[in-house]
Image (spheres, helix red, strand yellow):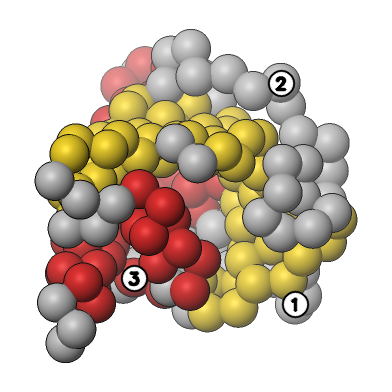
Amino acid sequence: MRFLAIAALVFVANCGSAPPDGPPAVTPPPEVSTEGAVVIETTATVPMDLATFRAFLVDNPLIGFLAPVDDLAPPVEARVLDGNWPDAGAVRWLRLEDGHYVIERILENELELFRYQIWVITNAAGRAVEQIVGEQTFTDVGDGRTRFDWTYAIKPRNGLARFFVNQRRSVFEDYLGGATDRMAEAARADANGS
């Protein structure tokens, strides 16, 4: 019987949900936490010094390199709701290609570190995910090159949700890894004057 209950909950968690009619209301974010999170990591090294690479990302935001993977849709519109983007504390919503939304805020934005928190998610994943803490680090590796590391800590709401998130790990890896690869390719082309 317990197996059937779990199977039913997993089925419900995997079912799609209709997008909302408009942007969701901003709710107070949970305390930032990565305890118990499912962690996704991706990395790339680009032929740009640290300051040049960060300027490249201002002109070519990373969200522009996200592409659909399975049922994960990329952002198509962003609207700042509070503060000045990309200053720490700024909040914005992103409308996804499938009509769903996420709300995120910047936790830190320094030359070598960019951290943010996503806590409002209107698609089916929002039922399983309490929050996502993203961290991008930028490391000068010499010879005019910068290593970019992107960590995505997906914190499930509970143990059953953790199972759901773990089942989707490869989708998240492809979503973030593909964006990182496309961004790095564009940075290399920019550095080479292509």
The amino acid type of the residue labelled 1 equals Asp
Q: Nearer the viewer, residue 21 or 118?
A: 118
Q: Position of residue 38 (x, y in %)?
A: 35, 26
Quickly name the residue at label 2.
Answer: 31
Q: Nearer the viewer, residue 116 or 31?
A: 116
Q: Which residue is mark 1?
A: 21
First along the sequence among labels 3 and 2: 2
Q: Which mark is residue 130?
A: none
Q: Is residue 15 left or right of residue 20?
A: left
Q: CA distance from mark 1 to mark 2?
A: 28 Å
Asked if 41 appears above or below 80 in the picture, the reply is above
**Disc 1/disc 3 C-alpha distance (Å):** 26 Å
Q: Who's the residue at 48% across and 12% down the image?
A: 35
Residue denoted by label 3? 65
Which x, y percent locates residue 70? 26, 65
Give the percent coordinates (x, y) of residue 101.
62, 64
Which is more N-terminal, label 2 or label 1? 1
Q: Residues within 10 Å of mark 2 (few under 14, many from 20)?
A: few
Quarter of the figure with residue 39: top left
Q: Quadrant of residue 30?
A: top right
Determine whether label 1 and label 3 are within 8 Å by CB: no
Q: Residue furthest front?
A: 143
Q: Is residue 36 above or below residue 114?
A: above
Q: CA distance from mark 3 to mark 2?
A: 29 Å
